[in-house]
Image: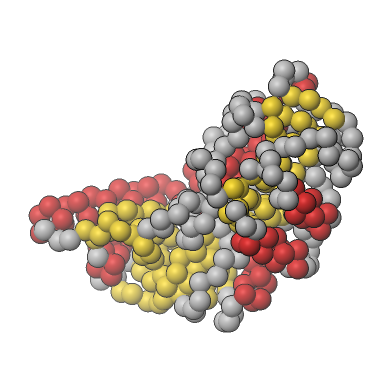
């Protein structure tokens, strides 16, 4: 018989930046965290915080161990009752990229458990008339084939950019891999756009700073936007040839006041304070509807700039924002902001 073993808050981040997540958590809330699986930090239940280096949180999660799947599913439902919306995820694979989930050794066990839970919920509701909660999501994080942590939280009413826990399984908003993209950097912007909940459109002028070889520019072009790509380096010839793209071979921090972008993208390799200032200035311009700015960090991470970015994201009037280390980010955070009144 499966037994409930423990209760904890779990924060999920990237396996390669878990040391940074631990340090950030230490500055945000009481209690010592420890890594219990790749990228998964456990703390005694407490105030739920939103670290930039956590992509997902499972508040007050309970641990369940069993000797087979059926027993594990039964123990989870015993503890949490029947919930219609069930999400099973696994820790992040060490390998990066959009196929990270499929290649995780527990991926097929996760799919099996998800199907089993859905069958059991439907069966018990139909046969025994047990009530099924529709106002919440049951998140199951599988750590071993028959060992999982589970947390139930009410559905968030707002957009993904404001929701916490994240609506994306494991906090990973992964898009399709673009095999013919100029670089794998497109993954970062695809993910950022999913968090933002808005896309550029043919009405937008996108200023893409540090654009070469053109991964982000080609994403913006795919939505029909006009793109001004700024980089001293060369763009991929296929991107450069696009009729809606202009390449400015110049310093991204130089004078670009002749452009009034509705979207600002910045992936320049620069001191994070410089990129942060660029974002702060851009937000003062009336035309700006959204921005994605990468803040490149170094170990040991000085959290001042991350804190400032979080404050900017949360406190800029008329904007919604978030500061997150996305799956596509290495030792970086993405500052994600959009106008609160923008159509989805
Ligand atoms: C991480 S790469 C950008 C990748 C790009 N987002 C993509 O999707 O292909 C960073 C770029 O910043 C550019 N860069 C660095 N400093 C710059 C500066 N001061 N002005 C313009 N570009 C700069 C580099 O040339 C490099 O192409």
Q: Is residue 255 above or below residue 137?
A: above
Task: Look at the image and name its color scheme.
Answer: secondary structure
Q: Residue furthest front?
A: 286
Decide which of 3, 260 is in the foreground and name it. Answer: 260
Query: x, y (%) of residue 254?
Result: 89, 42
Q: Is residue 204 left or right of residue 275?
A: left
Quarter of image, res 286: top right
Quarter of image, res 33: bottom right
Q: Is residue 287 above or below residue 61?
A: above
Residue 323 seen anywhere in this rendered image of the structure: yes
Decide which of 12, 206 is in the foreground and name it. Answer: 206
Residue lying at 57% horizontally and 37% vertically, measured from the top left? 199
Residue lying at 50% horizontally and 51% vertically, measured from the top left? 160
Q: Quadrant of the N terminus?
A: bottom left
Query: x, y (%) of residue 242?
Result: 72, 19
Query: x, y (%) of residue 41?
Result: 55, 69
Decide which of 120, 173 is in the foreground and name it. Answer: 173
């Amino acid at each position: 018989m499966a037994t409930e073993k423990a209760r904890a808050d779990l924060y999920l981040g990237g396996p390669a930046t878990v040391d940074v997540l631990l340090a950030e958590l230490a500055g945000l809330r009481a209690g010592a965290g420890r890594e219990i699986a790749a990228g998964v930090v456990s703390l005694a239940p407490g105030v739920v915080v939103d670290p930039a280096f956590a992509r997902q949180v499972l508040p007050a999660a309970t641990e369940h161990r069993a000797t087979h799947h059926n027993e594990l599913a039964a123990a989870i439902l015993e503890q949490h009752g029947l919930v219609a919306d069930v999400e099973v995820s696994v820790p992040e694979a060490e390998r990066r990229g959009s196929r990270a989930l499929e290649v995780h050794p527990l991926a097929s066990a996760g799919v099996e458990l998800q199907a089993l839970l859905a069958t059991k919920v439907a069966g018990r509701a139909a046969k025994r008339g047990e009530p099924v909660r529709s106002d919440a999501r049951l998140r199951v994080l599988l750590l071993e084939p028959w060992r999982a942590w589970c947390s139930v939280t009410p559905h968030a009413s707002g957009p993904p950019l404001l929701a916490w826990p994240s609506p994306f399984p494991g906090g990973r908003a992964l898009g399709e891999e673009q095999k013919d993209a100029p670089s794998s950097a497109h993954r970062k912007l695809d993910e950022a756009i999913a968090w933002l909940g808005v896309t550029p459109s043919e009405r937008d002028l996108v200023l893409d700073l540090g654009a070469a070889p053109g991964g982000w520019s080609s994403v913006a072009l795919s939505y029909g936007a006009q793109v001004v790509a700024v980089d001293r380096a060369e763009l991929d010839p296929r991107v450069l040839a696009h009729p809606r793209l202009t390449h400015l071979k110049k310093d991204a921090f130089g004078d670009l006041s002749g452009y009034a972008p509705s979207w600002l993208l910045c992936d320049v390799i620069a001191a994070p304070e410089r990129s942060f200032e660029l974002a702060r200035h851009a937000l003062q311009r009336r035309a700006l509807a959204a921005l994605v700015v990468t803040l490149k960090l170094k170990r040991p991470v000085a959290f001042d700039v991350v804190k400032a970015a979080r404050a900017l994201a949360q406190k800029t009037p008329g904007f919604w924002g978030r500061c997150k280390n996305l799956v596509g980010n290495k030792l970086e955070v993405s500052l994600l902001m959009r106008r609160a009144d923008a159509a989805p």
